[in-house]
């Protein structure tokens, strides 16, 4: 499957996605503005709390082309962060006490400077999260020792696995992905990841296969742990449930399947002010592959930079100025505030 970008699809244009999101009567739906909901909750303008996570998207290149991918990543994407931009991230990090650096993509491991970047962040003494799609570990011999490399730097591995069954995982991520993911999970387990007492954290990410909200995160975690251990002898630490946001390829699915209207109404009806108060953008700074600054990875994919009164690029990083900004919001933000809430760390309420 080609990316939307390679297909020259209308939804590859972020301004077109924003048009769809902003049309109050899109597909016949009458949707209240997200800003109106925040105002009712006493949260407008949405302001940052203490900056706790620097999330860096090191490129859109990926060995997979998943149907739900909000990055529209794939083998045909060539956007990649250079070592010079990584150095700017390191320089900014060194000015702060930000405790966590979250590396994402694409498949971040495909960036040729990925291991150098991890080593430099590790030398600064910060916790590192790598959002690993699992199959990259078994995609090529040069990646086979990634589990040992991760362990050496105490990296927390966060991996998407849509379901504990091969059918549902392969339907979302591609034929054969489940079998390769299980093989990679066993390699991670073999060096201690997910094993009690090892200190090496291995978390899995669940996202729904259709136009519905995830179920109970705790219940899903119990079921995943039981099934993966019994059927595949695989262990992990935590399961993070994430709601699909109505952008990029998931927006394509919603529009083509006729589910856009009902899904948006579902998100609006499930708006939770507690989840809104805990959205990840309040404590996260997102950095794009070219060094541009965003409030979150979803805003990044919609080309919604941080507010204009704040630095726009990592070369101009100013923690105090960023702290004074108002977070940029839009209709897709309903996805992070519905039900139990959703973030890169799972449920928020």
Image: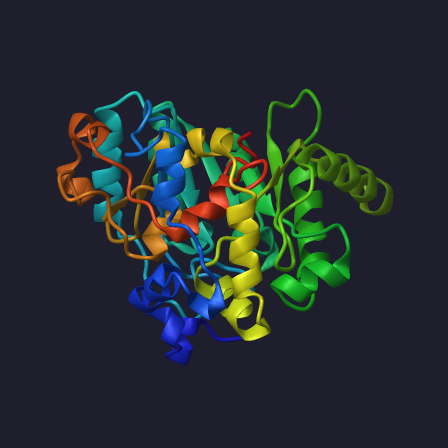
One can see residue 235 in this view:
no
Is 161 situated left or right of 338 in this image?
right
Q: Residue at x 79, y 43 (%)?
A: 228
Q: Residue at x 43, y 29 (%)?
A: 277
Q: Residue at x 51, y 71 (%)?
A: 255
- Quarter holding the N terminus is bottom right
The structure residue drawn at horizontal position 69% and vertical position 35%, both measured from the top left corner, is 236
**Closest to the observer: 349 or 164?**
349
Chosen colour scheme: rainbow
Choose top left, top right, bottom left or bottom right for residue 118. Answer: top left
Residue 148: where, in percent of width, then height?
56, 38
The image shows residue 33 at horizontal and vertical percentages of: 37, 49
Q: Describe residue 42's horizontal placement relative to residue 68 as left or right.
A: left
Between 211 and 345, the one nearer to me in the picture? 211
In this view of the protein, can residue 170 be seen by the observer? yes
Image coordinates for residue 156, horizontal then vertical, percent: 53, 33
Q: In the rendered view, tell whether residue 95 sits above or below residue 239.
A: above
**Is residue 343 rendered to the left or right of residue 295?**
right
**How many labels were placed on the picture?**
0
Q: Is residue 269 left or right of residue 296?
A: right
Residue 10's quadrant in the figure?
bottom left
State which quadrant residue 324 falls in.
top left
User: From the image, which quarter does the C terminus lie in?
Assistant: top right
Picture layout, residue 268 above or below residue 229: below
On screen, residue 273 above or below 165: above
């Amino acid at each position: 499957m080609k990316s939307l970008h390679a297909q020259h699809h209308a939804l590859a244009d972020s301004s077109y996605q924003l048009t769809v999101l902003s049309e109050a009567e899109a597909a016949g739906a009458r949707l209240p503005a997200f800003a109106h909901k925040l105002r009712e909750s006493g949260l407008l303008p949405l302001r940052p709390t203490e900056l706790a996570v620097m999330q860096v998207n090191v490129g859109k290149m990926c060995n997979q082309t998943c149907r739900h991918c909000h990055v529209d990543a794939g083998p045909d994407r060539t956007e990649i962060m250079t070592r010079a931009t990584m150095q700017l991230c390191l320089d900014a990090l060194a000015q702060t006490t930000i405790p966590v650096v979250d590396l994402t993509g694409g498949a971040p491991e495909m960036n040729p400077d990925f291991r150098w970047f991890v080593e430099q962040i590790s030398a600064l003494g910060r916790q590192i999260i790598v959002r690993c799609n699992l199959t990259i570990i078994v995609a090529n011999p040069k990646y086979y020792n990634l589990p040992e490399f991760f362990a050496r730097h105490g990296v927390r591995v966060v991996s998407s696995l849509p379901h504990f069954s091969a059918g549902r995982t392969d339907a979302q991520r591609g034929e054969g992905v489940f079998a390769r993911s299980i093989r990679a999970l066993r390699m991670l387990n073999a060096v201690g990841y997910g094993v009690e007492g090892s200190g090496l954290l291995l978390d899995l990410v669940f996202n729904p296969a259709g136009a519905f909200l995830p179920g109970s995160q705790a219940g899903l975690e119990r079921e995943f742990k039981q099934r993966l251990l019994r059927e595949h002898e695989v262990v992990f630490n935590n399961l993070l449930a994430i709601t699909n946001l109505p952008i990029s390829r998931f927006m394509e699915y919603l529009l083509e399947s006729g589910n856009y209207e009902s899904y948006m109404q579902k998100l609006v009806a499930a708006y939770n002010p507690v989840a809104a108060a805990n959205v990840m953008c309040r404590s996260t700074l997102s950095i794009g592959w070219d060094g541009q600054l965003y409030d979150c990875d979803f805003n990044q994919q919609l080309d919604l930079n941080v507010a204009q009164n704040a630095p726009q690029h990592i070369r101009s990083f100013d923690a105090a100025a960023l702290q004074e900004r108002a977070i940029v919001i839009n209709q897709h933000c309903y996805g992070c505030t519905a039900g139990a809430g959703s973030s890169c760390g799972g449920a928020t309420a």
